[in-house]
Image (cartoon, rainbow, N blue to C red):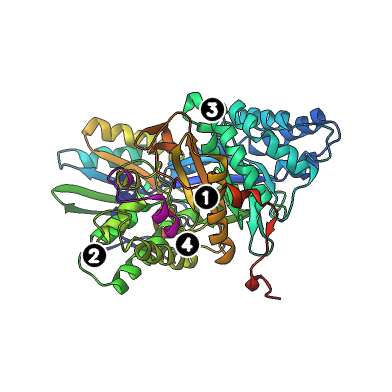
């Protein structure tokens, strides 16, 4: 099983999750928003679950020009445009649940 | 290091299984607001609540968005008003209830708890005035919740207060008759009440609590139900193990949110209440967990055992996940707020007597039960007395939140809407308890209260 890299810059990372039917332009859409706002992508993983594309990106917010909530809004909007669900959540939401 | 599967599991819990944080509750001490002039006391109360809780709602909302985890309610609990108001020259405490209501509206919380009195061994002057004001306070305000502790394992059961609460509940129902007796949904009678409970309507800020504190109540019956459903045919050991692990994960989210909220508000973090709190939404039901374990309907034989297993496993998992567990911490079984409970009552699978048995092994008690409008005050007092006895003898919290719905008969419905839901009116025993309740006095503390 592949583990996502969470070794760099702990405490300041965002987990971007993309769920929906596969189509052209999803990765480009998500990564361009992250690049535009100087969010460095530390890792990407993608898989197909029950016919849906599931992609998870780890972003470093250390030098980001916007805060997490703003990034979340922009990604949500892009998701609506592409007909998929894109969300951004603080890494602690996952680390707290699955790791001690 | 996390896997995509783990990330998806968390997202699925929120998206499909109704995982949420039920409440962030700010406890505020009002002990320094006492004043001989009731108006001066109320000015201090309003100022203190609005000053300390002014940021509660925006902070809660930003945490919810950052972590992608809904926080359903932001609420406030205060020092029992019977204590705060006691030294004022007021004849009744309506002004205090109105002040709480105004302060809650100003900071944008939907409920504020603490219109409360602790009378398990007897009533003081302030307690009596508060109890007398409860019906008017619940009818005349929107957000104020009241609670009264009438029994403890150490003191026994104050049967005078139990008798009085039967009349208070009837009066409250009568004054809110146009809303199916809604006032009673905001009033809880307790045995062994916890002082740090974040859940309404029973929340208040206990006298042993700090100046201000953040407590968190989690939820997540839907997540547990799905985990149980995946275990088709597994034995009870495997069932308990899975519920424990699931409760652990849910509670970690409560711990995360509680710590974040406390830090951002600059206040100490109190406790996580690890109760499984259902909502009327389908799939977010404690009854459906019991049914997923293999009972055709909640309320049939085996229900008490299933609930005991569930409640214990939730505590074991939750206790490991949080540094401070408190409040009620167990499974809630409110009727009107749980779609599976409502169905069980409608199909005649679940009766008041079985619910009472279930309260022996779960966290609270007879919660959000609608009974016919012509149920006597004495019968309601007797129902309360039974529930208090269970709490006192078993050294646990029990409570009664009962609605004698004006003008309604068995089979009718009360409709409260929102989180309070709707409830079918349940049958009570027709035989009288009047002579028993009329005795008055106090039922002594049980022998095992002598533990020193």
What is the CA distance from the residue labelled 1 to the residue labelled 3? 21 Å
Q: Check residue B176 in the rendering and tell me which mark sits there, or answer none.
A: 3
Residue B113, quarter of picture: top right
Are the numbered discs 3 and 4 placed on the same chain, yes or no?
yes
Specify whether residue A8 is in view. Answer: no
Q: Are marks 1 and 2 in contact (CB under 8 Å)?
A: no
Q: Are marks 1 and 3 in contact (CB under 8 Å)?
A: no
Instruction: Name the subunit of mark 4.
Output: B
Q: Position of residue B452 (x, y in %)?
A: 71, 76
User: Closer to the observer: label 4 or label 1?
Assistant: 1
Q: B322 or A76, which is in the foreground?
A: B322
Are the numbered discs 1 and 3 placed on the same chain, yes or no?
yes
Of callouts 4 and 1, which one flags the residue occurring earlier in the amino acid sequence?
4
Residue linked to disc 2: B231
Specify whether residue B420 is in view. Answer: yes
What is the CA distance from the residue labelled 2 to the residue labelled 3? 45 Å
Q: Check residue B360 in the rendering and tell me which mark sits there, or answer none.
A: 4
Q: Residue at x 16, y 52 (%)?
A: A48
> Dot 3 lies on which element?
loop
Q: Position of residue B139 (x, y in %)?
A: 59, 28
The answer to whether A44 appears left or right of B81 in the picture is: left
Q: B44 or B305, which is in the foreground?
A: B305
The answer to whether B324 appears left or right of B221 in the picture is: right
> Residue placed farthest to the right in the image?
B36
Q: B41 or B321, which is in the foreground?
A: B41
Local crowd at mark 2 within 10 Å, few (<14), some, or many (≥20)?
Answer: some
Local crowd at mark 3 within 10 Å, few (<14), some, or many (≥20)?
Answer: many
- Magenta stretch bounds: B345-358
Instruction: Name the subunit of mark 1.
Output: B
Residue linked to disc 1: B383
User: Closer to the observer: label 4 or label 2?
Assistant: 4
């Amino acid at each position: 099983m592949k583990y996502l890299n969470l070794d760099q810059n702990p405490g300041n990372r965002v987990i971007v999750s993309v769920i929906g039917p596969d189509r052209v332009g999803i990765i480009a859409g998500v990564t361009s928003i992250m690049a535009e706002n100087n969010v460095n992508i530390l890792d990407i993983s993608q898989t197909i679950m029950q016919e849906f594309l599931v992609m998870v990106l780890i972003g470093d917010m250390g030098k980001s020009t916007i805060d997490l909530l703003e990034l979340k809004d922009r990604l949500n909007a892009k998701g609506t445009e592409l007909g998929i669900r894109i969300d951004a959540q603080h890494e602690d939401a996952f680390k707290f649940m699955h790791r001690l | 290091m996390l896997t995509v599967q783990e990330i998806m599991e968390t997202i699925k819990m929120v998206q499909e299984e109704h995982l949420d944080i039920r409440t962030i509750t700010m406890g505020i001490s009002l002990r320094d607001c006492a004043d001989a002039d009731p108006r001066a006391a109320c000015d201090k109360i309003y100022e203190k609540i609005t000053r300390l809780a002014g940021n509660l709602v925006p902070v809660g909302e930003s945490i919810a968005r950052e972590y992608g985890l809904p926080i359903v309610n932001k609420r406030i609990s205060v020092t029992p008003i019977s204590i705060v108001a006691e030294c004022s020259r007021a004849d009744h405490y309506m002004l205090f209830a109105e002040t709480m209501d105004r302060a809650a509206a100003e900071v944008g919380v939907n409920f504020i708890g603490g219109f409360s009195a602790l009378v398990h061994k007897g009533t003081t002057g302030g307690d009596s005035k508060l109890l007398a004001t409860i019906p008017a306070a619940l009818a005349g305000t929107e957000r104020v919740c009241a609670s009264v502790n009438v029994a403890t394992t150490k003191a026994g059961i104050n049967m005078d207060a139990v008798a009085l609460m039967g009349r208070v509940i009837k009066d409250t129902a009568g004054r809110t008759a146009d809303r199916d007796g809604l006032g009673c949904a905001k009033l809880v009678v307790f045995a062994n009440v916890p002082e740090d409970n974040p859940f309404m309507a029973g929340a208040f800020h206990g006298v042993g609590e700090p100046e201000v504190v953040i407590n968190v109540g989690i939820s997540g019956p839907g997540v547990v139900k799905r985990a149980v459903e995946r275990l088709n045919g597994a034995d009870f050991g495997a069932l308990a193990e899975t519920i424990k692990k699931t409760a652990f994960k849910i509670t970690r989210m409560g711990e995360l949110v509680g710590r974040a909220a406390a830090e951002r508000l600059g206040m100490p973090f109190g406790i996580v209440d690890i109760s499984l709190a259902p909502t009327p939404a389908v799939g977010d039901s404690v009854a459906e967990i019991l049914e997923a374990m293999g009972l055709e309907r909640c309320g049939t034989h085996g229900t008490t055992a299933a609930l005991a297993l569930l409640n214990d496993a939730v505590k074991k998992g939750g206790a490991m996940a949080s540094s401070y567990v408190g409040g009620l911490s167990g499974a809630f079984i409110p009727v009107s707020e749980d779609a599976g409970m409502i169905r069980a009552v409608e199909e005649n699978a679940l009766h008041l007597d079985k619910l009472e048995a279930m309260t022996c092994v779960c966290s609270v008690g007879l919660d959000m039960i609608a009974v016919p409008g012509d149920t006597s005050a004495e019968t309601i007092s007797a129902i309360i007395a039974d529930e208090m006895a269970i709490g006192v003898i078993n050294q646990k919290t029990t409570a009664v939140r009962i609605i004698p719905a004006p003008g309604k008969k068995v089979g009718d419905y009360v409709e409260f809407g929102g989180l309070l839901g709707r409830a079918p009116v349940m049958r009570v025993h027709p035989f009288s308890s009047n002579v028993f309740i009329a005795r008055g006095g106090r039922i002594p503390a049980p022998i095992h209260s002598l533990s020193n």
